[in-house]
Amino acid sequence: MAPREGSLLLLLLLFGAALEVAEPGVPETTEGPQCPSPCACALDDSTDELSVFCTSRNLTRLPAGLPTDTRALWLDGNNLSCVPAAAFRNLSGLGFLNLQGSGLARLEPQALLGLRGLAHLHLGRNQLRSLAPGTFAHTPGLASLGLGNNLLGRLDEGLFQGLADLWDLNLGRNALAVLPDTAFRGLGSLRELVLAGNRLAYLQPALFCGLAELRELDLSRNALRGLKANVFPQLPRLQKLYLNHNQLGAVAPGAFLGMRALRWLDLSYNRVASLQEDTFSGLLGLRVLRLAHNALGGLRPRTFRDLHLLQELRLSHNRLQLLPERAFEGLGRLEVLALDHCQVQEVQAGAFLGLLNVAVMNLSGNCLRGLPEQPFQGLGRLHSLHLEDSCLGRLRRLTLAGLSGLRRLFLRGGGIVAVDEHSLLGLGELQELDLTANLLTHLPAGLFQGLGKLEYLLLARNRLVELPADALAPLHHTFWLDVSHNRLRALPAGQLGRLRFLSLSNNSLQGFMPPPGLERLWLPGNPWHCGCGLHALWALAQLHPGVVPRFVRAAEGEDGQPPAYAYNNITCAGPPSVAGLDLRDLSDAHFAHC
């Protein structure tokens, strides 16, 4: 079991036992020494181990009279400021010690004297500026050591000497700018090292020497400007490497050579301007590569040639402009490709050749006016295609050819003024089509032919004046239709019978015959003529008010806030006798002559 998993299991066991504890300061009912005030104690029935909880008790010094057989001690959230020498000398059996967030500014060199069996030590969220060499010499059994969120500006040589069993070391969110070559010497069992959120600008070749068992290294949110070729190959078993949120402008060729075990590489939020043919050489086992938010000006052929097992590639928010032929050659197992907001203006024919297993592709936020014919040919397993805000202008007949497995197509805000009648031909598996916020004034009569599996059709915020008479007839499984914020004056009769959710808000409708089976109707913003033509709608609202509620959820709440609601008015524009009233407030007598 990894150290982090072991720690979590221990915490759960301790908290589970704590649920049976009496009020703080009250001795437990089991036989043994009394619990020191103001702490609470719990004895685990299965292991017979004692845990003492002194969390957030405003302690300024360690509590007196701690039982000598204490196995786990929680002192987090206090105001201790300093841990004196030999503070725990009577707790030789202590295995877990939590001092997080206790205002510690100083840890005396002999503070941990006598804790040879201590396995987990948490010193995070304090104000420690330095630690003397030998501080951990008395805790040779440490498996996890948390020093994150302190003010450490340096690590003295030999600080971690003797911690041969350490698995997890967290030094994140400190003020470390330089690390000695031997900072981690002797930590041969280390599996996880966190250095995120420091001020490191340089990694010397000898820094990670000897960490042959390291599996995860987090160097994110530092000030690294470049990567040399001889830093990481000393980590043959490393599986995850986080280098995001640095200032990397270049990656040396072969920087990752020999890292066959690496599965996850995050280089996002840097300043990388170019990738060489051998930038990723040797990463034969890589599954996830993140390069979003850099300054990449293009993709060279064969850049990804060694990444045969890659499943996710994120290149969002770069400056690619052009996707050349065979840009992703070698990525036959890729499943997710993110190219959104990359300033792409041209996609050459064959740009996506070889991507036989891509399931999700995001090209939104580009200006794709220069798409070739059949740009997605060969992507038969693609099930989600994002083309939002992509300046498409017109959806042509062969633009989507070859996407026989597509299930979700997002064209929102694409600047589309027209769609060719057969532009969706061959998309028989499509389940969701989003054409929201375009410039469509009409739809071809046969546009939806063959889309018998379509469930969601979103046409809101266009300029549609009408829907062709038989346009919706092929949509046998569509249950959600949104045509709000258009200019519709009427709806095709007899084609809405399968719908369960229908939004007609903000159109120019005066009448409407509700089909059976509706579960929710959105109707505000229309000039309704509340005569006999709306009698059926009035009856529906009386019998099933939940279908046409007066208030509908407009947006989900954020940060724990309740969701926002909007009025779902059916305001009568005529006849004059009821103008301004809501249809649902009219009486039976108003429709007596119908």
Image (cartoon, rainbow, N blue to C red):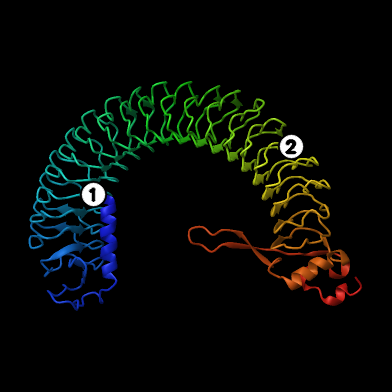
Residue 482 lies, with reference to residue 77, above or below; the image says above
Answer with mark 1 or mark 2, whichever residue precedes in sequence: 1
Q: Residue furthest right?
A: 593
Asked whether the viewer can see residue 580, the reply is no
Assess whether mark 2 and mark 1 are in contact (beta carbons under 8 angstroms).
no
The residue depicted at 31 percent of the width and 30 percent of the height is 259
Q: Residues within 10 Å of mark 1 (few under 14, many from 20)?
A: many
In screen coordinates, is 573 left or right of 202?
Answer: right
Q: Amino acid at mark 1?
A: Leu
Q: Quadrant of the C terminus?
A: bottom right
- Helix, strand or loop at mark 2: loop
Q: Nearer the viewer, residue 42 or 343?
A: 42
Residue 27: quadrant of the picture: bottom left
Cα–Cα gap, marks 1 and 2: 58 Å
Asked whether the viewer can see residue 68, the reply is yes
The residue depicted at 19 percent of the width and 58 percent of the height is 96
Where is residue 543? Give x, y as percent. 74, 73
Q: Residues within 10 Å of mark 2 (few under 14, many from 20)?
A: some
Mark 2 lies on residue: 417
Residue 247: quadrant of the picture: top left
Mark 1 lies on residue: 147
The residue depicted at 69 percent of the width and 67 percent of the height is 550
Where is residue 35? Give x, y as percent. 16, 73
Residue 185: quadrant of the picture: top left
In screen coordinates, is 171 left or right of 571?
Answer: left
Q: Amino acid at mark 2?
A: Val
Residue 125 lies, with reference to residue 154, above or below; the image says below
